[in-house]
Image (cartoon, rainbow, N blue to C red):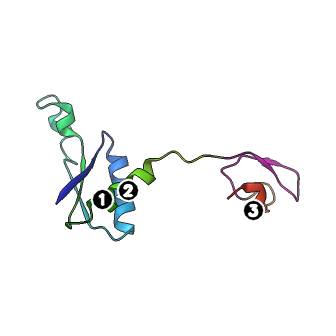
Amino acid sequence: MRKVHTAESMIEIAHLRNVLESAGIPCLVRNDRLAGVLGEIPFVECWPELWVKEPGQELRARGLIEEALRPHPTGNPWTCPRCGERIEAQFAECWRCAEGAEPEVRGR
């Protein structure tokens, strides 16, 4: 087994575990219950860790983690072609009339 990620947040570790497992990489979370000893041992030692179970999957796992943590560009807002409502870029469908953005408008 190899450690591939450590984070202060258990939410981040759980998300990344889900990313890896959905890609077929079995993994294990360690230190997920050490918050109670915080102060007794250094805080960084209490952070949850994500470990890959199978040898040879470490590089692939690190690449998937890097991609999952990379900020994604949001693009430009768009105007709904049906009702004229101004929609923020992260949405692919109008909240008012459920019309989808044209692919070239969304840039996706």
Residue 73 is at least partly visible in this image: yes
For mark 2, give the secondary structure. helix
Q: Is residue 15 left or right of residue 38?
A: right
x, y percent for residue 52: 23, 61
Q: Which mark is residue 103?
A: 3
| Magenta stretch: includes residue 18 | no
Q: According to the image, label 2 marks what residue?
A: 63
Amino acid carrying label 3: it is Pro
Q: Residues within 10 Å of mark 1 (few under 14, many from 20)?
A: few
Foreground label between 3 and 1? 1
Q: Is residue 44 left or right of residue 22?
A: left
Q: Determine whether 15 is above or below 55 in the image.
A: above
Amino acid carrying label 1: it is Leu
x, y percent for residue 48: 24, 46
For mark 3, give the secondary structure. helix
Residue 15 is at least partly visible in this image: no
Image-quadrant location for residue 107:
bottom right
For mark 1, give the secondary structure. helix
Which quadrant does the N terminus fall into?
Answer: bottom left
The Cα atoms of the two marked residues, 3 and 1, are separated by 34 Å
The Cα atoms of the two marked residues, 3 and 2, are separated by 28 Å
Q: According to the image, label 1 marks what residue?
A: 59
Residue at figure coordinates x 33%, y 55% from the top left: 62
Q: Which mark is residue 4?
A: none
Foreground label between 3 and 2? 2
The Cα atoms of the two marked residues, 2 and 1, are separated by 6 Å
Magenta residues span 75-92
Q: Determine whether 45 is above or below 94 in the image.
A: above
x, y percent for residue 93: 73, 59
x, y percent for residue 28: 23, 60
